[in-house]
Amino acid sequence: MQNPLTNVLMFLVFLPLTANAAPPLDWLLYQGEFKTDVTFSEEQNTITMQNGLVRRIWKTTPTGACIQFDNLMTDESLLRGIKPEALVVLNGEEIPVGGLIGQPNYAFFIQEWLDSGVMQADPNAFHLVDWQIGETKERFPWKRVRYLPKFVADAPWPPAGKSLDMRYRLSSEAASAIAKNDVNFARQLEQTEVIVSYEMYDDIPLLAKYVTVKNLSDFPMTLNRFDSEVLAFVEVEHSVESRMKLVDPWQKDTTETTPFRPHTVLSNGQQSGVWLPKVHIESEYEFIGMDARSANEVVRWEPDPQFRTQVNYERTTPCLLKSGLIRLDYEMTPGEKFVSPWTFELVFDSYDRERCGLAQRRMYRTIAPWSSENPIIMHAGSVRETAIKLAIDQCVEVGFEMVILTFGSGFNIEDESQGNIDYISNLVKYANDRGIELGGYSLLASRGVGAKDDVINPVTGKPGGFARFGNSPCLGSEWGIHYFENLYSFYEKTGFNMLEHDGSYPGDYCGSTEHPGHNGLDDSQYRQWKTMTDFYRWCRGRGIYLNVPDWYFLNGSNKTGMGYREDNWSLPRAQQIIHGRQNIYDGTWAKQQSMGWMFVPLTQYHGGGAAATMEPLSENLADYERHLANNFCAGVQACYRGPRLYDTEATKQVVQKYVDFYKKHRDILDSDIVHLRRADGREIDYFLHVNPLLEEKGLLVIYNPKSVDVETTLRIPLYYTGLTDKAEIFDAENDVATVYLLDKFDTVELPIRVPANGIATYVIKAAAGSR
């Protein structure tokens, strides 16, 4: 059985690279080689920020304008035109920030247009006043309290890199023209500052951008909306006909060579049948969803009305990137500043799905390193003291690290009574004294709390039909404000170590004008998001672990669902096991294993009866073991939901076996997965953990769903292990090592044997004398 990926590798050849086409090393394999530098050229009047992988250049005269955004890995220019550095709408007036106007053709721009004065500063835009080069900034505190893999444990926070802050003001003439003879408004505009901030990070083609709007006047001002990023990207694909009409939402197959290795590739970031540039754009301002695309709220790809020469007849090619809030109406008091959510821009060197996924996973380790925390968690099904202590004691025995008072357990975090506080505090002490962290469940959205405090439909003036879950509490209502006051208080008083926050704020607008936490419809989403993320950031600063089934990683959450249909856990156990491997394989393309939880129905969940559940555990031990193998060998933690982890000594030994295996190889099992063959229930399926920074550089996991042993030879690609000539591969079951030579495609032919309905694992290290 050979992997299709490696078959393709055997027939592709490298394209020659020009001298400046790529850095000398693959950044996915090496760290410490790509340092960020920011320099100012007085001769050119330009600021350059680059790290050897990506580069942005700004003109400083006649104003601040980004004139280059370059992919140094592929020697590509990403921009075809110059746009404002940002757009802000103040008191209903849209005002550009920086940028140049007068570009004759938005298919490209040339240096002569800049030098000859054809392109000039917009007289009615905020103009660059000064700038400051500095170090990266901590977005919020991160307290490290639990195990992190070695390759993340020493990661700096904030991430290493450089920052650039560019300050803009309006001239008095521009302020008067924009204010249309409104003297007070003109004075306000003159006393408004916009700071456009960038960060670029070492060892990754990644930068961040955000804007700060300061009202330095003596009058209130409304920030109606803003775009913190506006980029005229080169269109990657064009068509005379309108591709937006095509029903083609899926990624397309093609092949392409990269600067490092040829790969089978899939387009990454495709929208309505149109290919987008080699970038992943992600904002902090995200809500419902278990992946970044589903959660996206503000990143938009739009047609560019200034791009009059595009091939598309209707000029609808989505090649203008914007990131910002289109509904805000934020009232800024005198002296107040508004800091926008950060937008992160990751540049890819190909459309290869694996490389793009590896890059995106590195991004989360860089800007949300807490997402690499991966404690082993039991979900206790009862809040009774004897049941919780049993769960804690069993966790101690087999090596689990955290207990959650799960949904349906009877735990109520909204119970503010002293009795409840004392009860939980004593349980926390009992758990912590034994090395176990303790936390609990709270449901926020997807329920109603009353007509006065629910999200209000602006059409009807009543709850219902407007929230994403039909009904949901408004976080700006009296109930919402009190709910969060209680959460802060509960965690301070009890010492709870984690929160499972179900139905986190999903991005609902609220039409109420009576809720104290927002003014009306347009500011309701931002203010609720701020309430939610302020709390999560507070948790991150205290080391409180956050299980959140929505995409809040960039604001401090640790884990979301791997991606599965809950009803599937009511299927017969044999089907669950295949589904589980498919879910893990599919869910780890763009997120680390530590970022997604799986599920094991120790007791009945969504029906299915005895055929679907593990209890009695000893009577269904073979299926229980397969679930354990699915999760622990993938480096994935699951919701082991029930009253106990084991019921007999034999069951305990099986659980202990997989916990021990995970802890023995924890760093490599928490490392990236290279996807090799997806589970189909008919043939073996397998994947490879890789990390060139570790002694254990790879760990191959093979599952056999068949009722007979499988013996075959697999071609295993070892490029992402960092090995180049030979590898020592250990059969983990028998601890037998063999040295294999890598071929010119960095692959080895590995004889394997996998027992019927079983698993085989192989640890890969550098062989003695290898390069």
Image (cartoon, rainbow, N blue to C red):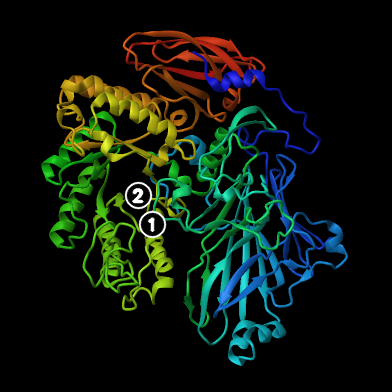
* SS label for mark 1: helix
Residue 525 rendering spot, x and y as whole percentages: 41, 66
What amino acid type should be assigned to the residue bearing mark 1?
Tyr
Q: Give above or below for 456 relative to 172.
A: above
Marker count (numbered): 2
What amino acid type should be assigned to the residue bearing mark 2?
Val
Residue 415 rendering spot, x and y as whole percentages: 17, 60
Determine which residue is flagged by label 1: 536
* Cα separation between marks 2 and 1: 10 Å
Determine which residue is flagged by label 2: 548
Q: Quadrant of the C terminus?
A: top right
Q: Give above or below for 296 relative to 690.
A: below
Label pair 2/1, CB-CB below 8 angstroms: yes
Q: Front-most of 151 and 380?
A: 380
Instruction: Please tell me in which quadrant of the rendered image residue 109 appears.
Output: bottom right
Instruction: Please tell me in which quadrant of the rendered image residue 471 appears.
Output: bottom left
